[in-house]
Amino acid sequence: MTERALPKTHSSPSISRAAAGALIEAVRNEAAVAGFDVATAVTDSGGHLVAFERTDGTPFLAAEVAVDKAWTAASFRLATHTWNSLVTDPRVAPLAHHPRLMAVGGGFPLFDDGVCVGGLGISGGTAQ
């Protein structure tokens, strides 16, 4: 009987720096049209920061919130606005106390061909 070697690593697709930069530019342009300043963060699929921008006039707290929204979205592959209803479940409620979990709108997982490649976090405006 021959043993089959198990793989020791796997490839994990991730958003490119160029795509992250283009996404930040698109968010900045839309926020300008809407009339508000934003902090925008893009993470890879592991929640590590790939790109970030904070427009002039954006409150400094928005910067940290944007990064945590992107982290939350990439981590669970769920939009952050869904967490408000999830943490009402007693089995999930303890996660609400995690220091990086952002249970407010503005965080979105980024998918490419059905595979999560990162997270987007936008802070400074409204959830819409």
Image (tube, rainbow, N blue to C red):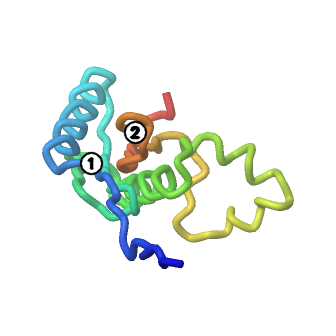
User: Which of the 4 image quarters holds residue 105?
Assistant: top right
| Label 2 SS | strand
The residue at which mark 2 appears reads as 111
Q: Residues within 10 Å of mark 2 (few under 14, many from 20)?
A: some
Query: Residue at point 40% right, 62% down?
Result: 46
**In the drawing, does residue 103 fall left or right of residue 70?**
right
Query: Residue at point 31% right, 50% down?
Result: 42
**Image marks 1 and 2: residues in contact by CB distance under 8 Å:** no
Q: Amino acid at mark 2?
A: Phe
Q: Please name whichever residue, 18 or 29, is drawn nearer the observer in this view of the structure.
A: 18
Q: Amino acid at mark 1?
A: Ile
Position of 62 relative to 127 (above/below): below
Q: Residues within 10 Å of mark 1 (few under 14, many from 20)?
A: some
Percent position of residue 8, x then y? 39, 76
Task: Residue at the far left: name it.
Answer: 18
The residue at which mark 1 appears reads as 15
- Whole-angstrom CA distance, mark 1 to mark 2, is 9 Å
